[in-house]
Image: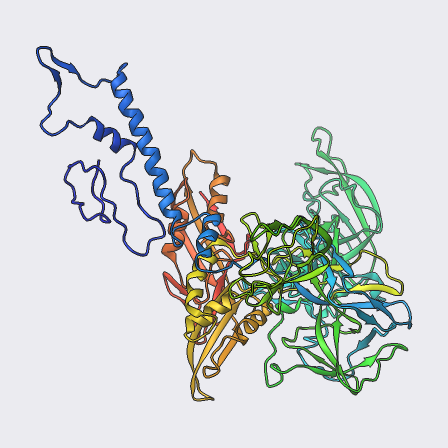
Amino acid sequence: MNCCDNSKPEAICPCGEFVHPRVIFNAPGRDALSYRAGDYATFRRALLQSRPGETELTREGQGQIWRPTGEGDLALQMMEWWAYVADILTFYNERIANQDYLRTADIPENVNRLIRLLGYRPRPGIGATGVLAALANGPKPFVLPKGFQIQSKPGPGKQPQIFELDVNTTVGGNISAQATSPPGPVPAELTPGPNQRVVINNSDGGLSIFLAGTSSAVRKGDTILIQLQPKFSTDSQPPFAITTVSGVVHQKDSSGKPITEVQVPGIDNSAQITDITHYELFTGSQAAHLYQYATHSSDVIGSNFAHLDSIYRQIKVDDWVFFQSGGNTKKFRVIGYTEKIYYANNPDAPGTDPSTTSPPGHAGTAILHSLLTVDDTDDSLDSGMSTLMRFGWRQVGLLNPVPSRFLPTPSGAGAAANAAVPLQPAGDLSFPQVSESIPVLIEDATGNGARGTLGPGQTLTVDNPVPALNPPLQVLFNLLHVSRGKSVKNEVLGNGNAAIPGQEFILQNAPVTYLQGDSNAGDDYSSTIEIWVNDVKWSEAPSFYGQASDAKIFVTREDEQGKTHVVFGDGENGLRLPTGVNNVLANYRYGSGAEAPDAGSLTVILQPQPGLKAIRNPVAVGGGSDPDAADKVRRLAPKSVLTFNRAVSAEDYEVIAAQAPGVVRARAVYEFDADEQRPVVKIRVGDNQAAVDAAKQALADSDDPNRPAVIEAAKKIEVTLSLTLVIDPTRKIEIVRQAVHDALVDSDHGLLGINIVEIGQPIYDSQVFAACAAVPGVVAIHDLTFVSTAAKSQVGSKSSICNCDHRHDPGDDSYFFLPDDSQHLVIMPT
């Protein structure tokens, strides 16, 4: 046994001395305890050691009677049994010791049991909320009742979600209308450009075009054709462009809708493209060369004909074909197709007409090939067009305007302010004249939208942050405030028994819906649970502490399986349940979590309503969050005890903000405000505006009025990480590669997981090497590159982003984000 261990005070190196039992010592700050007195090998060796003064087992007059051997030795086997037993006992003893401390406990059930001693309740899942719009069939108003259900259209691999109307809402007639922007300049926040044809791709300096949805028909290296739809052109040959795909990225736009970004090195005549939505994309082209064995090119290609190098019977009359030579591309329609025989390898008369047979005794090679005749237009085939013909295009789909998240950020004095635009109703529609501002939803031509306000004078104001919208704009009235969760009515929990203190029942459906807002279950969230006992409604309380003995209250908690328990008083703190048969009933809603439907998908009406035409959803719902993970609970629970629900230190602000629904990460620092000439607390929150709003609400009643607090969204810096692995040849490459992928980007455990990376957290190359090297089968790692898009965009200017040789620092107000796709994470095995 090597006793060298720097964590143990008795260790010396090397000594060869056998020490048993081990002296247990743990340095402070570790995430796991070493608590084993020994293992099988050390226990076995200790059992075989002679006792003090004993050299061997003997009996007087008989000499040596036993020495351990490896063959059929029952005494040795008994010692090994004891070593096995001791090994198992010390193993579980160490596991139990680790689960007894919050820092080292790694089983969620144990974490939850430990934090109960602190009075800390892990936050349950919070349901998302949002605003929809109702379209009516006619002018007669009607009422949509509270609890009216709308279901989402689930995407691939997802489940439908049900949202319910929060309050009774009157829908006034068909007052939704379409509006176009007025002539003249319109603020850049609303119309980023009339064409929206391409956007500079920061990763390689090329251009990007976009397809709605997730398309697998376009791949890197494909040749693609961009062509104006014939219905939008009076020209017999609509404008077109041919280019090559340099990359494909599947992602989402700012509203959560899936899109496919097609990256290209450039488009020769992109300036001619006036509206990308009128264009369609083709791919999968086939290529053909001209006949190769003629001496004179005029025998092969002329003003309106071309001999190809082989048979291409898939080409039909009226097909479009493209001839390319260098950077020149010409487009023609096929008007005739025939097949001819030419002769090659004529050694005696190589310059003769290829359609003529060779002299007797010198038979040439007969080549059957296709002859195309094309329309005679302003462009004509000529002898210079000698390289390549493309044909056989397959339509992929219509092109999409550039999503707002890819457009340049507006700058200037008006960029930070809301955009106010006077609207002109389209056709014979008109807006209602309003004496005071009313909330509306705005939907653009692509289905994206924003919240806004319609004020007197038909002036539309778009709420911050102002997205890029593409006119014509549709203004939607009759707003519906909805929240996630499906209602359960009059679920029988059981029988009350006044003889039992603290009766407890479990709700049948999970997870129960909790909503952010006035607290009846936690600090800044409330449950949707209503309890009725003998037809009397009881109230929910955060705890039994300080409750009167006759208070008709109940408390809720979640168990390790996510089931919600309803607990009643013991007669001293809270009233006991009265005795009865099935006299305890529950109304509640279930369904919660961070995952929310994409914009435009929450539109399915589950029960027809007279007068209701449709539901529109241009702005995605949000604000939901998953139940607190064990790692988050372990980090926040001890700190929450120090805050006492009051924010004094920067860490207090950070802890309270981090506990808000939807907040994945938070960071608070003191900064000097030059305008106010005093220090302020800056709290940066990830990952979206809903998280920022939740943090503001959580801190509203807890912050120190003498310490101004500024809550902002943290900046997300996308990074590209590439490396090459040397893999053990006895291992399966794909298994090792997937394990390295998970070690880097797994949401909850990866080095750069979305739920792991903190604001202001630097990343070191050594951390990446260590995470990869810990994967079984990885022999070595080399060619590591870690590049942030922020650093790229700031080349040549002063940047706060540190990308040193081995240390990468996002800055105090930002955090790194590694997208889980092949464009940003490149793992090359060798």
Quadrant in the picture for the C terminus = top left
Place of residue 49 in the rendered image (x, y in percent of width and height, measured from the top left): 17, 28
> Looking at the image, can residue 456 be seen?
yes
Residue 131's place in the image compared with 114, above or below, is below
Q: Residue furthest top?
A: 62
Q: Is residue 80 left or right of residue 310?
A: left
Residue 466's place in the image compared with 364, above or below, is below
Nearer to us in this view, 639 or 255: 639
Residue 647's place in the image compared with 537, above or below, is below
Residue 592's place in the image compared with 271, above or below, is above
Instruction: Give the residue drawn at x 89%, y 76%.
Output: 427
Instruction: Give the residue drawn at x 65%, y 76%.
Output: 466
Place of residue 12 in the rendered image (x, y in percent of width and height, measured from the top left): 16, 45
Instruction: Give the residue drawn at x 38%, y 49%.
Output: 100
Place of residue 206 in the rendered image (x, y in percent of width and height, measured from the top left): 59, 64
Quadrant in the picture for the N terminus = top left
Q: Is residue 237 left or right of residue 733?
A: right
Place of residue 755 in the rendered image (x, y in percent of width and height, measured from the top left): 50, 58
Q: Is residue 86 left or right of residue 180?
A: left
Tell me where residue 574 sits by quadrant. Answer: bottom right
> Looking at the image, can residue 207 be seen?
no
Tell me where residue 525 sits by quadrant. Answer: bottom right
Instruction: Give the residue drawn at x 59%, y 70%.
Output: 689
